[in-house]
Every structure is written in structure tokens, then in C-alpha cells.
Image (tube, rainbow, N blue to C red):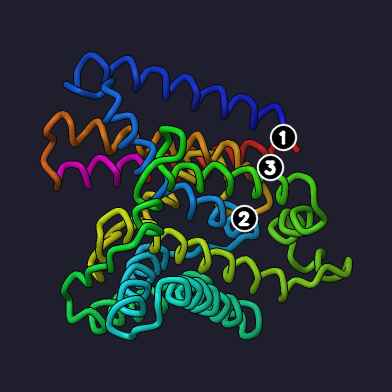
Amino acid sequence: MRLSRGVNELGLLAAIVVLYLVLGTQAGGFLTGSNQLGILRDAAQIGIAAWGMTLVIIAGDIDISIGPAVAFGSVMVAKAATDWGLGIPLAVVLTLVIGTAIGAFAGFLRAQYNVPAFIATLGVYSALRGLAQFISNALPVPLPESRFFDFLAGEVAGVPTPAVVMIVLLAVFLVIALKTPYGRAVYALGGNARAAELAGIPVKRIRISLFAVNGLLAAITGVLLAARLGSGNGGSAMGLEFDVIAAVVIGGTALAGGSGSILATALGVIFITLIGNGLVLMGVNQFLQDVVRGVIIVLAVLINVLLGRRRRLTS
């Protein structure tokens, strides 16, 4: 298992190097400092949510509500800080708490009533996108002038603040996945939920907590996105869930659960971000960009399934 993960990670590293070589010669401005900072910002938008999604998929579930949850978070923090007069600190805390609660609700449906994760989060997807547009009247909600939001939209030692947040959270999730009983329980849950429950693992609580964390990460991403755009927007983060899931699957996390790596997901995030950035710089039509992303996702899932079959045959 570890050998196959290592091969997968080396393959991704090689693909990233090839992408840099190709885009560096074919996409004008790709290697400029400003574009590299832009890549880091874009990677953070995918990566922060991808860390939580990796654990969710390892546990044998999936969460497709990420995009609307991010958009809803951006609208919430903007409305709470301006129209609702709560002030910036309380607005941020409220956004994070509500995001966590919404994620926990989806997890509760999955854990308590055995609602398929796809269906539970599909309902949340629709509700949050509608709520975000309703609360904002389908218009951007400007953020108030604030040093805090300027900091979130700015840089720390030359590195975009969202990228710093992404890297810090990456370290946290690596420790959780590899060094804690909770992380081991997540892998056990994805491997065989019934056996995990018989072994005394609190399956329901873990499922709820995984979706709650996903909701929290989506809310964090929403706050960072609002700071970057200068406003909350109910129509933002369209299709983000596909990029997040694609990054996780490209990283080799098994859709059937029980196997995956946060570090490999990080490489998947870089790969997906580079593809998106390169297509824009090369002037590829937006609709064709969606086609390319779709093809990448299908190929990643196909490879994932084939590798899963190979593991089962050799184990």
C-alpha cells in the first residue's frame, strides 16, 4: 500500500514538473512572480476544502456541497459585518459556527438515518446556493473597510495569506491523519464500517465530525474568498466542489474509502490549479476549460477504480 502511494506521489510530481515545463514555454506570463502568487491563491481556495474532503472520502463518504457552502460563507460574513451590524469579529465567528453546524447537519443525516452522503449533501448544495442568492438579492455584498480583511487578502512574508492558512491546515491534517487515534479510526471506518463499529469505534460521531469539519473549512474558504474579492457573492465558487473532489481523487484517495493520503491530495491540488491557470493564460474558451476539467475528473476516477481493483486482487 505504501509503495503504491509512493509511486502515485512520484507520478504526480513528475506530471507537475512536466506541466511547468510545458506551460512555461507555451503560456505567456506563466512563470512571472505575480502569476505564481496567483497560483498560490487559487490553490488555497481548493486546498483548504480538499484537506477535509480527503478524510471524508477516506471514510467512504463524499460531500458535494463545498461550492455553495463557500459562497454562502462569503455572503454571511459580508452581511453580518455590514447590514446586520455585528462587527467583523462576531461576523467571522458566526460564519464559522454556522458553516460547522450545516456540515454537522449533513453528517447527522448520514450517520443517524443512513441517508447516502451524496443525497444529503446534494440537498445542502441546493439549499445553500439558494440561501446565498436570497440573502444577497443575487448581488455582491461589499465588505467594510478593515485591516483584518486587508490582511486576509494580502501577504505574509511575500506569501499570500490564504496560502499560509492552507499550509498551516495541511500540517494540522497531516498530523491528524497519520498520528492520532482519530485518523486511524477514519481509515478503519472507510475500510469496513461494520467492523469498525464492532471494534468500539464511535462511527456515528466520527461521521458527523467529518462533515462538520468540512463545513468549517468551507466557511473559512468563504471568508478568505470574500476578503479577496472585497465582497460576498452568492454566485461565487461555482464548480469548486468538482475541483476539490478531482484533487482528492487525482491524489489517489480511493472513492470506496479506506485508503488515501493528505500529502498526495496536496499534489493533486497543485496539479488541478496549474491546469486551470494554464488554460486561462493560453486563452482557452471557458466552456472548453470545463470540458478539460470533466475529462480529467473522469480519467482520475477511472484510474482510481482500476487501481482499487488491482489492490484487491493483489491483497
Residue kind at label 1, given as amino acid type: Met
Asked whether the residues under the numbered discs 1 and 3 touch, taking CB atoms below 8 Å apart as contact, a structural biologist would say no
Which residue is identified by label 2?
A: 55
Q: Secondary structure at mark 1?
A: loop
Residue 283 occupies which quadrant of the picture? Answer: top left
Q: For the point 36% across and 45% down, which residue is it?
A: 154
Q: Secondary structure at mark 3?
A: helix
In magenta stretch: residue 290: yes
Residue kind at label 3, given as amino acid type: Arg
Q: In the rendered view, would you say 291 is above or below 12? A: below
Residue kind at label 2, given as amino acid type: Leu
Q: For the point 82% across and 56% down, which residue is it?
A: 181
The answer to whether any part of residue 96 appears in the image is yes
Residue 257 at x, y = what percent? 63, 54
Q: Which mark is residue 312?
A: 3
Residue 272 at x, y = what percent? 37, 38
Q: Which mark is residue 163?
A: none
The answer to whether any part of residue 116 appears in the image is no
N-term-proximal mark, 1 vs 2: 1
Q: In the rendered view, would you say 36 is above or below 191? A: above
Q: Which mark is residue 1?
A: 1
Q: In the rendered view, would you say 287 is above or below 212? A: above
Crowd band around label 1 with a 10 angstrom C-alpha radius: few (<14), some (14–19), many (20+): few
Q: For the point 20% across and 23% down, which residue is it?
A: 29
Q: Please provide the residue range marked out in magenta.
A: 288-296
